[in-house]
Amino acid sequence: MSMREAVVEVTRGPVVESRHRGILAVVDADGAAVVAMGDVERPVFARSAVKLMQALPLIESGAADALGLTVSELSIAGASHNGEPAHVDTARAMLTKAGLSPDALECGTQWPDRMDDMATLIRANARPTALHNNCSGKHAGFLCLACTMGVDPAGYVEPDHPVQREITAALSAMTETPLDASVRGIDGCSIPTYAIPLSRVARGFARMGTGTGLAPARATAAWRLRQAAAAEPFMVAGTGRFCTEVMGRFGERAYVKTGAEGVFCAILPERGLGVALKVDDGGTRASEALMAAVLQRFVAKDDEERTFLDTWAKRAIRTRREKQAGEVRVAAETLAGLGV
């Protein structure tokens, strides 16, 4: 354990050009810290990294089973996806099962992340829709919950809507943190987001992996959501994405989920641990590198798996002629604090 901040370095030649600083918590289900770097009691907006917790009511309420949601649909309910055709089709299918059209989505429109998918829309003289929004699967899940609850789905993104009250209650219980307007912001997809101490987010994910302290229905819901992500990791993110690549490699051994502004969370079921980290400047290149180093320490079982994770833990910086100019790497003192 170390109170020193986590650091990710960016080099150019032999010189460190930039540094990303952040905080990291690796915690067991009882709240005991295995790793604590920086002020892990600092509240952070966990953003999309907590989508798995936000999807708990979809299963606990019976909505998922009542509508016959598939494994792929449960996986995308906790996703921040690329807006690829399979993502769009899966979110649309969820809405169809709820008897709704894509017009019911209140997450806003967004261009797909990948250039190829943008080009496909442009060539077809088409515009992106809310189904392309990286959060459309999560929002489709919210709408499925609203319809099964028998409430008007309109305004389901508002804090006082019955759907958001259920989501907030689940998140509050999992992190053992009171959540109200004093710690509430608005996420990019228009739903409420809450500032929660990083260590409590990590503990919540440890509980998601172990079931410790959870009622049977909630423990089962957490297990089903983890199973869905492991079975259909493409739905969680998409082509070339850290979350999809890592879960595709490690399966049920590691659930990982990114969030905006340098947040990353993980469940390590075999170790009974939850992970939460926040890079202060919001840099994704740093949050991915740091999470990769955590996985090298707690999940990788051999050199082959550690080398696979080096794709992110030691990412080459290249010129436009593909010559290596430097790298993004986790600082030596941070690695030492992790025991890597």
Image (cartoon, helix red, strand yellow):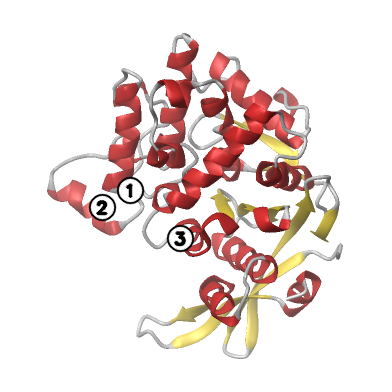
Front residue (pair 129, 270):
270
- Neighbor class of circle 3 (other Cα within 10 Å; few <14, some 14-19, many 20+) is some
Q: Amino acid at mark 3?
A: Gly
**Disc number lying in front (3 or 1):** 3
Q: Using the rendered view, name the quadrant where residue 167 is placed.
A: top right
Residue at 56% x, 48% y is: 259
Residue at 72% x, 24% y is: 180
Q: Is residue 173 left or right of residue 148?
A: right
Q: Using the rendered view, name the quadrant where residue 221 is placed.
A: top right
Residue at 72% x, 69% y is: 7
Residue 259, numbered label: none
Placement of the N terminus among the 4 image quadrants? bottom right
> Considering the numbered disc 3 on the image, is that residue within a helix, a strand or a loop?
helix
Placement of the C terminus among the 4 image quadrants? bottom right
- Residue 181 image offset from top left, x and y in percent: 70, 23
Q: Amino acid at mark 2?
A: Asp
- Mark 1 and mark 2 lie on one chain; the one further toward the N terminus is 1
Residue under numbered circle 1: 112
Residue 222 makes an appearance in the image: yes
Vertical arrangement, residue 268 with respect to residue 148, above or below? below
Residue under numbered circle 2: 117
- Residue 20 image offset from top left, x and y in percent: 66, 66
Spatial CA span between label 1 and label 2: 6 Å
Label 1–label 2 contact, CB within 8 A: yes
- Mark 3 and mark 1 lie on one chain; the one further toward the N terminus is 1
Residue 248, numbered label: 3
- Residue 174 image offset from top left, x and y in percent: 71, 34
**Disc number lying in front (3 or 2):** 3
> Considering the numbered disc 1 on the image, is that residue within a helix, a strand or a loop?
loop
> Considering the numbered disc 2 on the image, is that residue within a helix, a strand or a loop?
helix
- Mark 3 and mark 2 lie on one chain; the one further toward the N terminus is 2
